Image (cartoon, rainbow, N blue to C red):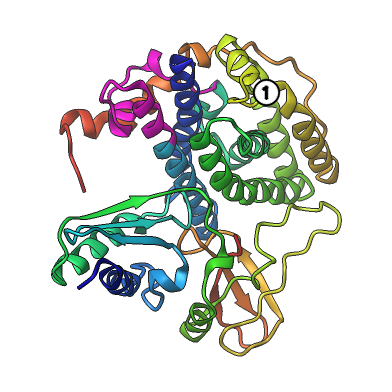
Amino acid sequence: MTADLVAYAQRLGDDALVLAQRLGEWSSRAPELEEDVALTNIGLDLLGQARALLSYAGEVEGAGRDEDDLAYLREEREFTNCLLVEQPNDDFGATIARQLYFSTYQLELYQALRGSADQTLAAVAAKAAKEVAYHRDHATMWTLRLGDGTEESHARMRDGLERLWPYAGELFEADEVVQRLAAAGTAADPASLRDGWDRHLDATLAEATLARPDGRWLPGTGRRGVHSEHMGYLLAELQYLHRLHPGARW
Amino acid sequence: MSAGVATETARGLAGQVADPEIPVLTIEDLGILRDVVVDDDGNVEVTVTPTYSGCPAVDVIRDEVTRTLREHGYGEVRVRTVLAPAWTTDWMSTEGRAKLAAYGIAPPGQPGRAGPVPVQLTTWRPEPVACPRCGSADTREVSRFGSTACKSHHTCRACLEPFDHFKTL
C-alpha cells in the first residue's frame, strides 16, 4: 500500500509539475500582458501543488528523496504524468483547450480527494481545489470568447480541442494502483469524475458554439512512464540547470 | 519569563512580520499565522499556512519570523507550514481589510461569502468590486490573475484608474 501511495502522490505531482512547466513557457509570449500574468500564475499554483505532492511522495517512500530530487533527477521513464499535460503549447487556442480539459478534470479530482482517507492528500486537495476553481473559470471564459468570437478564433479553438481530444481519455483510466487505493478510500475513482467533467465541458462548448470532438480517445501510457516525443525536450529544459549545478539555489 | 508569557510575546513578535508582497499587511492581519508555541528552553515552534499553494512569499516569511524571534533572544526557531485547514480570505482581519483598502487594493468579499463561485454559464457575471480610490462600483475585471497569486486586476470606469483586488478564496 505504501508503494501505491507513493506512486499515486507522484503521478498527481507529476501532472501538476509538467503542466506548470508548459504554462511557464508562455512567460513573455502570451497574446497580451494580462494573459502572460494569468498563465504563469496558474503555473505557479500548479507548481505549489506539485511541491506538496512530490515532497509527500518522497516522505512516504522513505528513501531520503525530496521534491527537488524527484523533479530534477528522475529520468523520463520515471515520470508518470498523463500525456495531455506534456503536449506542446502550440497556439493559444490549443493551450486553452488543454487547460479546459485538464482543469475541469483536476477540479473534480481535488474536490473528490478532499474526502480521502489519507489526511495529507485531503489537505493538499482542499487547498488546491479552491485554486483550480479559478483555473477552470479562466479556461471557460477563454473558450467562450474564442469559440463565440471571430471566424479565426473559433477555428483555432476548435482545432485545439480536436488536436488534444485523444489525450483526454487517459485522465479517466484506472490502473491497479488507482483501483486498490480507490477501494481503500485513498484515491478518487477516475470513473466517478467523468459525469462532472462531461457536464461542464458540454455546457461550455455549447455556449461557445463549439462541437464536442467526436474522435477516439487514445489509451494512456503516461502512468507507466511511456511518454510522447515532446517529453524529453520538456525535461531537458526543466532539469538542465539543476543537473549542471547540483544543489543550485537562487 | 514564564512559558505562557513568552508564548504570548513571541506570537506578538511573529505576528508583526510583514507580508513581503503586500507590506502593509502583517501575517497576523492575513490570518496565516496559525500557532506559536514556546517551550521551557525558549525554543519556538511557529505554524503558518500559505494563502496559495505556490505562494513564493512563504519562504521569505519563514526567514523573517526566524530572524525576528532570534533577535529577541529566543532559542531555536522552527517554522512549520501546514495546509489544513485551508486558508480562506475569511481569516483576514477587519483591520487588515481596512489597511488593504487604504493601500489601494480592494479587499476580498465579506467573511462568510468566501470561495470562488462556479461559473454559471448563461448568467455568470463577476462580482462587482468597488474601486478602492473613488469608491465607485462601476468597475471592470481586466484579468482574474493579477500581480500576485492572490490578486486580480481591475479598472475603474468612473475614475479610470487601474487597481488590484485581493481575490476572495
Residue A83 x %, y %? 54, 21
Q: Is residue A180 magenta?
A: no
In the image, residue A148 above or below residue B32: above
The quarter of the rendered structure image containing the N terminus of chain B is bottom left
Q: Residue at x 69, y 66 (%)?
A: B113
Towards the viewer: A119 or A6? A119
Residue A154 x %, y %? 75, 42
Q: Residue at x 61, y 88 (%)?
A: B159
Q: Is residue A77 magenta?
A: yes
Q: Please provide the residue range marked out in magenta.
A: A53-82
Residue A12 x %, y %? 51, 29
Towards the viewer: A114 or A163? A114
The quarter of the rendered structure image containing the C terminus of chain B is bottom right
The residue singled out by tag 1 in the image is A190
In this image, A248 relative to A48: left or right? Answer: left
Q: Residue furthest front?
A: B2
Amino acid type shown at disc 1: Pro
In this image, B72 relative to A43: left or right? Answer: left
